[in-house]
Image (spheres, rainbow, N blue to C red):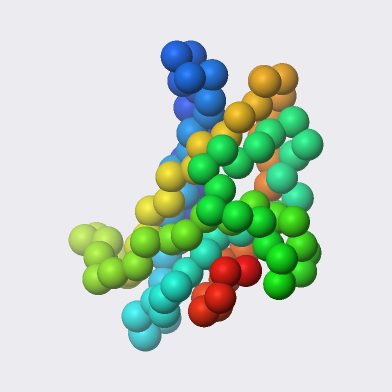
Amino acid sequence: MTGEGFVFHPHTQTYSQVVHIANDGTSPIAEPLWLALDSLSANATLFNADGTTAVLAPLGSPYVSVPVGGDRHPCVHTEVKTVHLEFLDPSGDPITYATRVLDVTLAP
């Protein structure tokens, strides 16, 4: 997984980040797929969260759904999914988190 830098949007006072999830395996990515942000810094809120983890620990981590389909990166022939994250951070302090990719049928 790789993440691009944070971009501040002054008109909405939000930050955005693009994250790429690569499938290194030979099988297609299963769906549904979720990206959980564990240990999100206290100064930030994931604005476009689809929910918070209530089944898989650690509980209370915000998550977003990951679009799945047949897109492949043209240079490396790897299936890559792109996720757009939007954050509220009134303090302007650095946003930190750890990621977890979940492939569970029910929302995590």
Q: Is residue 42 left or right of residue 68?
A: right
- Return the x and y of residue 20 as percentages of the image width and height: 43, 54
Using the image as rendered, state which of residue 46 and residue 100 is in the foreground: 46
- Residue 5 seen by the camera: no
Quarter of the image where one finds residue 18: top left
Q: Is residue 48 left or right of residue 66?
A: right
Quarter of the image where one finds residue 73: bottom left
Residue at position x 75%, y 39% from top?
41
- Return the x and y of residue 83 as percentages of the image width and height: 43, 51
Residue at position x 45%, y 14% from top?
11
Using the image as rendered, state which of residue 6 and residue 14 is in the foreground: 14
Which quarter of the rendering shows the C terminus? bottom right
- Compared with 84, 11 (above or below) is above
- Compared with 16, 67 (above or below) is below
- Residue 45 seen by the camera: yes
Residue at position x 71%, y 24% from top?
93
